[in-house]
C-alpha cells in the first residue's frame, strides 16, 4: 500500500556575520554569495569590508505597476497588477591595513559583484545572492545582478587604505526566497495479497491526496521529481481542477524503469530525465496546466500509472516573500 510521508527540509544555514540594524528590515546578518559560491560577509564590522547600513534601500515590499480603466461613474477600476523587477542600493566600505591589501580587497570584491554579468554554462549571466539571516535562525535570499556604482568617492585620502562604493543591484524576480526548501514525499510500498488473510485492495497508482502548505506571501512554482517504475504521472490541484500529465510512453524514452527519474519544472515549463533527455513532448499539451501553489493551503493529488514498490513523487518549492 502507499507509504505517505511529508517533510520540510531545513538544512543548517552557513555561518553568518553578526546582526546589525539595517533600515527597512531591523536587525539582520547579511551575506553576499557570488556566482562561484564564495560567501562575502556584509555586516561584520571587524572585517575589511562591510555594508554602510544607513544608505541601504530596496529591501522592502516588491514594486508593482497597476493598470486601471476609467469608470463611467467616476474614478477608475483596477484591471491588472504586475510585479516589477526591483533595485537594491547597497553602500559598501572597503579597507585594508596598507595600500596593497586595500587594493586587493577592492578588486576582489568588485570582481565578486560584476561577475554576475558574465555568461554561465548555458550562456546566460549567473546571479549572485543576497542573504538576510535573522537572529531567530530564519533566512531569506534574493538573486541579484550588478548594475552600477563600483566607483570610489574620489576625495582626498580615499583610495589609499579605504574607500566606499554605492552599488545598485538589479533583481529580475522582486521576491525573496526562503533559503530552506519545503518538500513533500510520496512513495509506493509493497502491495498486499488480495486474498490473504482476507479480501483487500492495494492501489499501485494513487499515491494519495494531500494538503500542501505555502507559508510565503505569493505563489510558488514547484519542481517535481518522479522515481520509477511508472508509465504516466498526473498531478491535480483539486481546488481549481488544474492538472497536467506526463505520459512516458509518448516519449522516446518509454516507460520509467525502477530507479530512473524525471524532473518536471513548472517555471519555466520543462521535463528532463535523469540523464538529461528532453521529455516535454510527453506532457498533455494543450490541456496541461503546470500550476502554481498560492499562499496558504492547497489540496493536491499525485497519481502514477504503472507504479510498483519504490515508485515515488517528490515535490520541492521555496516559499517567496514580499520583504527581507
Image: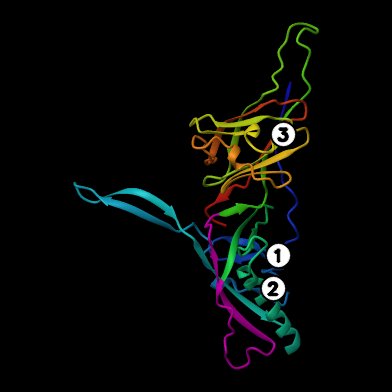
Total marks drawn?
3
Compared with residue 276, is residue 111 higher up or lower down, i.e. above or below?
below
Disc 3: which residue: 256
Task: Name the residue located 72 percent from the left edge and 34 percent from the top edge.
Answer: 256
Task: Choose top left, top right, bottom left or bottom right for residue 192.
Answer: top right
For this orientation, the residue located farthest to the right is 197
Label 3 environment density (alpha carbons within 10 Å; few <14, some 14–19, many ≥20): many
Stretch in magenta:
147-175
Residue 215, given in percent of the width and then of the height, sits at: 58, 43
Q: Magenta stretch: residue 292 in it? A: no
Disc 1: which residue: 18
Which of the marked residues, 1 or 3, is nearer the chain's N terminus? 1
Where disc 2 sits, the SS reads: loop
Compared with residue 93, is residue 274 higher up or lower down, i.e. above or below?
above
Disc 2: which residue: 45
Which of the marked residues, 2 or 3, is nearer the chain's N terminus? 2
Which of the marked residues, 2 or 1, is nearer the chain's N terminus? 1
Amino acid at each position: 500500500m502507499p507509504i505517505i510521508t511529508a517533510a520540510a527540509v531545513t538544512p543548517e544555514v552557513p555561518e553568518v556575520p553578526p546582526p546589525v540594524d539595517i533600515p527597512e528590515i531591523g536587525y539582520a546578518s547579511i551575506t553576499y554569495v557570488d556566482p562561484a559560491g564564495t560567501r562575502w560577509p556584509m555586516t561584520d564590522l571587524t572585517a575589511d569590508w562591510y555594508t554602510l547600513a544607513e544608505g541601504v534601500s530596496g529591501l522592502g515590499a516588491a514594486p508593482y505597476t497597476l493598470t486601471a480603466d476609467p469608470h463611467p461613474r467616476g474614478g477608475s477600476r483596477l484591471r491588472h497588477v504586475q510585479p516589477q523587477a526591483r533595485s537594491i542600493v547597497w553602500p559598501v566600505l572597503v579597507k585594508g591595513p596598507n595600500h596593497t591589501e586595500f587594493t586587493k580587497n577592492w578588486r576582489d570584491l568588485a570582481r565578486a559583484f560584476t561577475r554576475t554579468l558574465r555568461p554561465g554554462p548555458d550562456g546566460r549571466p549567473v546571479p549572485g545572492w543576497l542573504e538576510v539571516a535573522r537572529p531567530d535562525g530564519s533566512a531569506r535570499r534574493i538573486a541579484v545582478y550588478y548594475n552600477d556604482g563600483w566607483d570610489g568617492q574620489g576625495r582626498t585620502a580615499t583610495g589609499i587604505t579605504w574607500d566606499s562604493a554605492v552599488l545598485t543591484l538589479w533583481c529580475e524576480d522582486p521576491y525573496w526566497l526562503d533559503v530552506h526548501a519545503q518538500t513533500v514525499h510520496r512513495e509506493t510500498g509493497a502491495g498486499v495479497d488480495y486474498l490473504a488473510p482476507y479480501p483487500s485492495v492495494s492501489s499501485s497508482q494513487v499515491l494519495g491526496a494531500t494538503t500542501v502548505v505555502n507559508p510565503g506571501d505569493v505563489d510558488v512554482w514547484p519542481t517535481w521529481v518522479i522515481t520509477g517504475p511508472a508509465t504516466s504521472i498526473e498531478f491535480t490541484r483539486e481546488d481549481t481542477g488544474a492538472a497536467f500529465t506526463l505520459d512516458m510512453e509518448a516519449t522516446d524514452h518509454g516507460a520509467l524503469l525502477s530507479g530512473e527519474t524525471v524532473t518536471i519544472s513548472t517555471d519555466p515549463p520543462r521535463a528532463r530525465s535523469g540523464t538529461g533527455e528532453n521529455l516535454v513532448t510527453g506532457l498533455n499539451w494543450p490541456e496541461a496546466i503546470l500550476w502554481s501553489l498560492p499562499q496558504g493551503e492547497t489540496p493536491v493529488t499525485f497519481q502514477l500509472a504503472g507504479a510498483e514498490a519504490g515508485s515515488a513523487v517528490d515535490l520541492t518549492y521555496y516559499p517567496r516573500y514580499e520583504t527581507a
